[in-house]
Amino acid sequence: MSLVAILTLAAAPMPDGAALDAAIARRDAALFYAAFEGCDADALSGYIADDFRMVHDLAGLAVPDKAAMIEGTRERCAARLPGGAQEGYANRRLFVPGSRRVQRLGDWGALEEGHHTFHERRADGTWELTGGARYIHVWQWTGEEFVLSESISVDHGAAAPYPPAAD
């Protein structure tokens, strides 16, 4: 049997319908946890395709490739350690429930669109909402799992005042 035939047999079919939505939601949550709150560049590496890039409304081509994403995460995480320039800093990204839309891209992957908010931990242990954005992700199916191929991050802004002003 040829290597191609063996690899074809080993590859699982890409999820569809509710299973696709659940798989993307799971990968999205794990990716952002590794990048933000978990601050784990090694884990993050497993969620990103080799040809990854990130385009950002405020920075343009913010991350040109996977190596830059992983190295940037390592540097940010190291700065949070004791003696680092941002010792003790912590932030998190939270998905906005109900905002996710997933669309299948043939058998190659999926497009995910959604909104998220960003939070920073304060000295008293509480989390403060610091902003939000919309994101568009292109996820590639590997035959086993989805990896993030491209991230487009737009509509960044300050956190809306809370409670909202009365009309």
Image (spheres, rainbow, N blue to C red):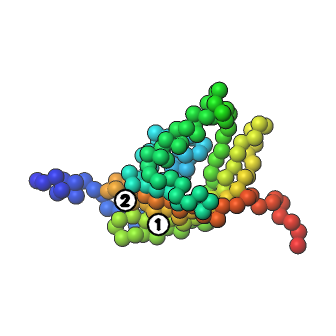
Q: CA distance from mark 1 to mark 2?
A: 11 Å
Looking at marks 1 and 2 on the same chain, the residue that comes earlier in the sequence is marked by 1
Q: Say whether residue 32 is left or right of residue 125.
A: left
* Mark 1 residue crowding within 10 angstroms, few (<14) / some (14–19) / many (20+): some
- The residue nearer to you, when weighing 81 against 15, is 81
Q: Position of residue 83 (x, y in %)?
A: 65, 26
Q: Kindly tell me whether residue 115 is visible in this rendering.
A: no
* Mark 2 residue crowding within 10 angstroms, few (<14) / some (14–19) / many (20+): many
| Residue at numbered disc 1 | 111
| Residue at numbered disc 2 | 141
Q: What amino acid is at disc 2?
A: Trp
Q: Say whether residue 141 is left or right of residue 83.
A: left
At mark 1, the secondary structure is: strand
Q: Position of residue 43 (x, y in %)?
A: 47, 42
Q: Say whether residue 47 is left or right of residue 125.
A: left
Question: 72 above or below 157?
Answer: above
Q: Position of residue 45 (x, y in %)?
A: 44, 45
- The residue nearer to you, when weighing 29 against 18, is 29
